Image: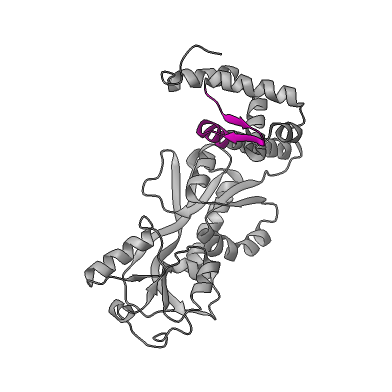
Amino acid sequence: MASDSPTTLSSAVLHERLLARLRLRHLKLIDALAAHSHLRRAAEAIHISQPAATQMLQEVEGLLDMPLFERHARGMRITEAGRLLALHARMVIDAMQVASDGLAALAAQETRALRIGAIEAAIASVLQPALTTLHAQHPKLRLFIEEGNIERLTTGMRAGALDAVLLRQPARVPDAHRFVPLRSDSVVVIAGIGYPAAQRKRLRLSDLADSRWVLPPTHFAVRQVMEAAWAAEQIVPRPHAIQVLTPQLVRALLSQPDVVVPVPRTVLDQLDRSAVVELPLRMNAPIAPLGILYRTDNAVGPLLLLVDFLVAQAKKKA
């Protein structure tokens, strides 16, 4: 075990140790332990013996001078250090899978599959309407599409596990990256078809004073837009006791006649419009558009083809 204490071990020293002594087999074990929380089951999952797994774990913990898992009677409990390393182990393993797919495609003289990450709104509003035409026009283009939240997907792209991410325009586009907007968006307020004022031609926010609002967290763009609108009209909304973001659960709440929900207009693509009505509020409430983020040095071949196709589809709908 190295002599440096965890409190004095610098990032530079750790980096050099990891580059010099950490092996992919170590990362496979950490990933398996994070998934199984049990040494024997993790060893079986990566096809090594339990004594070998014990030795490998000791090697990694000795390398880092910190425990990654706490042993207890029923298995193992991951530490914060273990959780962090397991996250990056998974990204390295995913990146190696991307490399393997590309090399296999080259060997077979095929086009490698693009790995595309997408948030739920982008899947419904950008990908879903385009996939049938995309496949018809480019049958040899292969896509692997993964849904996730923005933080997880952008981390995956930085690690090389994803070629591009469909998401809302970030406040700052990272260096050596490009964001291409594909669909504009704005805030709308929806209710169920049983909402008392659903058939009116015009509403003001004050007309919704007796309604219960299902609201996103304060850091969401939709919430910030609504906070500004309420402040302008000096309105204090009544929050619903249940706060959800998932469209399927929003639908359930909208069956209650006094419930209203502010959402991005693109969320309407995920809802059954026969059961939902957009309330006729006149709000100038744009939010960040949906688009595709990718590294500029990766914009060749299949990825460039996909970007050009999505831009062309967006222009047709504009």
Asked whether, in this view, residue 286 is left or right of residue 108, the answer is left
Residue 18, position as x, y percentages in the image:
55, 21
Total labels: the figure holds 0
Residue 262, position as x, y percentages in the image:
40, 69
Q: Which one is nearer the viewer's eye here, 294 or 241?
A: 241
Spot the residue most to the front.
73
Asked whether, in this view, residue 259 is left or right of residue 95, the answer is left
Residue 24 versus residue 193 in the image, above or below:
above
Residue 291, position as x, y percentages in the image:
47, 55
Q: Which one is nearer the viewer's eye here, 256 or 92?
A: 256
Asked whether, in this view, residue 293 is left or right of residue 36, the answer is left
Residue 248 versus residue 52 in the image, above or below:
below
Residue 96 in sight in this render: no
Please say whether residue 74 is one of the residues in the magenta stretch.
yes
Specify the quadrant that holds the N terminus.
Answer: top right
User: Residue 97: which quarter of the image?
Assistant: top right
Residue 19 versus residue 308 in the image, above or below:
above
Residue 289, position as x, y percentages in the image:
42, 59
Give the color scheme: rainbow, by chain, secondary structure or one colour: one colour
Specify the quadrant that holds the C terminus.
Answer: bottom left
Residue 121 in sight in this render: yes
User: Residue 263: which quarter of the image?
Assistant: bottom left
Q: Residue at x 59, y 17 (%)?
A: 21
Please say whether residue 61 is one of the residues in the magenta stretch.
no
Q: Which one is nearer the viewer's eye here, 115 or 277?
A: 277
Q: Residue at x 74, y 22 (%)?
A: 51
Q: Residue at x 42, y 68 (%)?
A: 241
Spot the residue most to the top.
3
Q: What is the span of residues highlighted in magenta in the rendered image? A: 66-88
